[in-house]
Structures are given as C-alpha cells and as structure tokens.
Amino acid sequence: MKQPFIIGILLVAAHCVSAQVTKRSPALTNRVEAKKAFSLQPSALVFARTRSSTYQWGELLSEANDIITVDFMDGWGKCVINKTGKVLSSTGTFNVKDSMYVVEIMENRHELTSPAYQLSQGVISRLAYSVNNKPYTYAGYSQFDQATSCLNVYPVAYKRTKYCRIRLTQNKWSINYSQLPEFVVGSDVTAVYYYTDKRRIFQQSY
C-alpha cells in the first residue's frame, strides 16, 4: 500500500525540479548582452565640420540614396545627414538647427605593419585598433618611436585625457602601457589600421 504513496511523492518532486529549471532559464538568457561583432576591417571614417566651425570625427554606418548615417565619437551621437548637409536626426548633442559645411569620407585604410614608413606617407590623424578581437577603437596617435617600437594612441572618446601605448614585436602588436581600464597591459592588439588622406567629398558648401 505504500508504493502508490511513494510514487506520488517522487512525481511531485520531479515536477518541482522541472518547474525550477524552467524558471531559471529566462534569467540566464537575460544575462546575455548583445555586443557589436568584430569585423575584419574597421569602418570608413567621416570628418564633418559645421557652419559654426565645430567639427568631429565619426564612424560611417551606412550610405544610401544620398543619405549617410554616422556615429560621431565626441558627443554628436548617431546623425543622419543628407547631401545638402542638413542633419535629419541626431541621438546626441548636435543642434539640428545647424548644418554641415563639409563632410568628407575616408575609405582608404590599410593594416599598419611598417609604422615608421606607412605613417609618413600622407595619412590622417586617426587610426583604428582592435584588442583581443573586440570592436575597433578609433584614436589619435603620436609619432612612432622606432627606439622602443611603440606608438601612443589616444581614444577619441577620452578627448586626449588618457592614452595607451601599443608595441610592435615580431610583427605583432600588444598593449605595452595603459591608462584605460578596458585595455590591460599584455593584451594582444589583434589589428591596427591607418587611413590615408585620400578622401571622398560627400558634401561641401562654398
């Protein structure tokens, strides 16, 4: 007579365990954060100057039907710009009453493997680098130090208040010094790209 009672208890226990597992699964799913995937090459860069003489660099996100979307790096946010220089929308601090005076697109980028030579050949003052295959960071940079094989890079987001030093050893880049918590000394720098000063004029007012 005890067997049906014991079987009933086991069935209830199994149901409870199943319910607990079912309840935990969504919580685990919610912990997964959507991240921007690493791409083999960095985006084209955009230089934009307004009629009020302010300027910023941005990452070109898309271009279609004479309209570009740019993710600016220093406060303007994501802006949608048409061929006349009018800013149709902005997620940042850009004043949409203003308009762009010059919009230039730098699409010609190459992997930085011989910095002493390549950075002396007509380049712009921005480069892109990836650490441990993470999305590219866009930065200003100093002159390459041939004695130490190092290059100081200044991520645009920090407005030149912080920097890290990357070093080239046996054709591989790594973090040699860092003031930024997201870049740890010794980390692999997966790729470094520089941009030539060849540019495409998207919009220019005279």
Image (cartoon, rainbow, N blue to C red):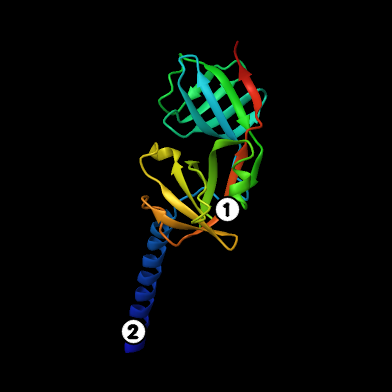
Mark number displayed over residue 25: none
Which residue is depicted at the point 58% across and 23% down? Answer: 103
Which label belongs to residue 191?
A: 1
Q: Amino acid at mark 2?
A: Ile
Check disc 2 and report the residue beneath it: 6
How many residues crowd mark 1 within 10 Å: few (<14), some (14–19), many (20+)? many
Q: Residue at x 57, y 50 (%)?
A: 192
Give coordinates of residue 194: x percent, y percent.
59, 43
Bin the neighbour count of mark 2 within 10 Å (Cα to Cα): few under 14, some 14-19, many 20 and up: few
Give 83 or 3, whichever is nearer the viewer.
83
**Residue closest to the eye, 41 or 154:** 154
Q: How many marks?
A: 2
Q: CA distance from mark 1 to mark 2?
A: 63 Å
The spot of residue 189 in percent (x, y) is: 52, 56
Horizontal side of residue 140 vs 2, given as left or right: right
Q: Earlier in the sequence, mark 1 or mark 2?
A: 2
Asked which secondary structure carries label 2, the reply is helix
Position of 1 with respect to 42 (left or right) is left
Residue 52 at x, y percent in the picture: 45, 14
In what element is the residue under mark 1? strand
Residue depicted at x 59% and y 13%: 205
